[in-house]
Amino acid sequence: MTFFFKRPQRVLTALALIALPGLCSAERIILSTEEQARLGIVSQALGAASSQSGMRVPAVVIPSPDTPSILQSRYVGVLQRWHQTGGAQLEAGDIVATLNSAELAQTQQQWLDASVELANQQAKLKRDRELFGEGIISRQRLEQTQRAYQQARFKREATNNQLQLAGFDTKALEALRDGQGKPGDYPLIAQQPGQLNRHFIRIGDQVAAGQTVATITSTQALWLRATVSAPLADGLALGQTLQATTGSQHASLILVSKNHQLNDDTQRVEILARFTEATDLRPGQSLSLVLSSVHSGVRVPASAVTHSGSITSIYLRNNEGFEKRDVQLTPLGADYLATDTLAPGDTVAVEGTAQLKGITLGLGGGE
């Protein structure tokens, strides 16, 4: 790479070289404060890289995937009733809506039949155990009764699990057994506290199996999702503290998930971060996520860095002028991160680095 100076800069630098014998010695450049000002060289003290230093990427607020925030229908059916208004504050266990399904009515009947059969088989098993103890029946007869009882219990447990998935707790199952309630009716129950977001479904509307009927937003269970390039993802560590911003609002997060597989379409990596405190942000809201490095170090402005092939250098100010120093740097947003060789408070040239590099190479010098 060849460096070119504007004519006034060439003249000024040439005069400096003539007027200052021994101006450049190896990697040291001797320049007084007045001479630095004359050459247009400006220096700046370096600061430690903070959590606000780094690449900013777009991100979106999402409900926590670790909590059941979506209420879905389990069966094809019809919406019978809304028990809560949109925006209502819910507690875990509150009934949100009631649906009716002909398919579920069949499952309910199967559960009732299985419950009756289980009770009959249980009574038979008790009787045959007594008869076996008295020597009236054979062991083979007792074993047959035991197998029949086990089959009846399995069948009842299978239908019982289906009803529990539909929202039937012990109390609801007892009501079903006692003939209370309408066949095919089942509730959608909030599994966590939060604010209700109703989807636009009217009473009497058909609802498909697996269709989302409502969601619950909890300020205690919000996460942030973003996609980043693989190199950026490699610089992040699970458990790392990150920052997000929207306008004047700032929030702290913990990185909780980092996929190792690239998305087929975007060729990017999905990351998830959890808010450390309750927030008034809403799911779907867009933020900027600051991807700071997991390593501590010093933030180096991009304007302070010069490049010679794969070598990156800075000009460190000292009492005599500057010292050229080759450093290992890691990209940090628009700037760089130095994890060694530099310390907070070190002063480097941030303007006039081209003049300093030209001095070390000789006017009009090249690489």
Image (spheres, rainbow, N blue to C red):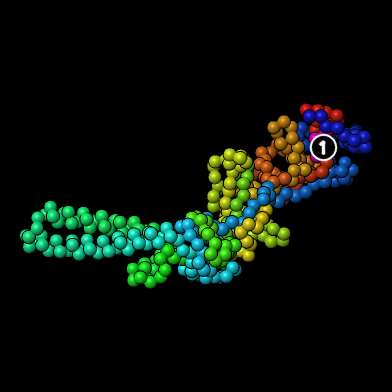
What is the three-letter code of the residue carrying label 1? Ala
Side (left or right) of 60 relative to 91: right
Rendered residue at 42%/68% (across/down): 182
Depicted 52 relative to depicted 328: above or below: below
Residue 342 x/y as whole percent: 68, 44
Identify the element where label 1 is drawn. Answer: helix
Residue 252 x/y as whole percent: 62, 58
Q: Name the residue under label 1.
A: 354
Side (left or right) of 7 relative to 79: right
Residue 154 x/y as whole percent: 29, 56
The reply to whether the magenta stretch includes residue 354 is yes
- 197 or 40, which is in the foreground? 197
Report the residue that reaches farthest toward the left: 135
Which quadrant is the N terminus positioned in? Answer: top right
- 269 or 202, which is in the foreground? 202
Which quadrant is the C terminus positioned in? Answer: top right
Side (left or right) of 178 relative to 317: left
In which quarter of the view is residue 287 placed?
Answer: bottom right
Residue 166 x/y as whole percent: 43, 61
- 301 or 57, which is in the foreground? 57
Rendered residue at 57%/67% (across/down): 195
Can residue 163 be seen from the camera position used here?
A: no
Please give the count of numbered marks on the rendered protein. Answer: 1
* Dominant secondary structure, magenta: helix
Task: Point out the stretch of residues depicted in magenta.
Answer: 353-358
Rendered residue at 69%/61% (across/down): 249
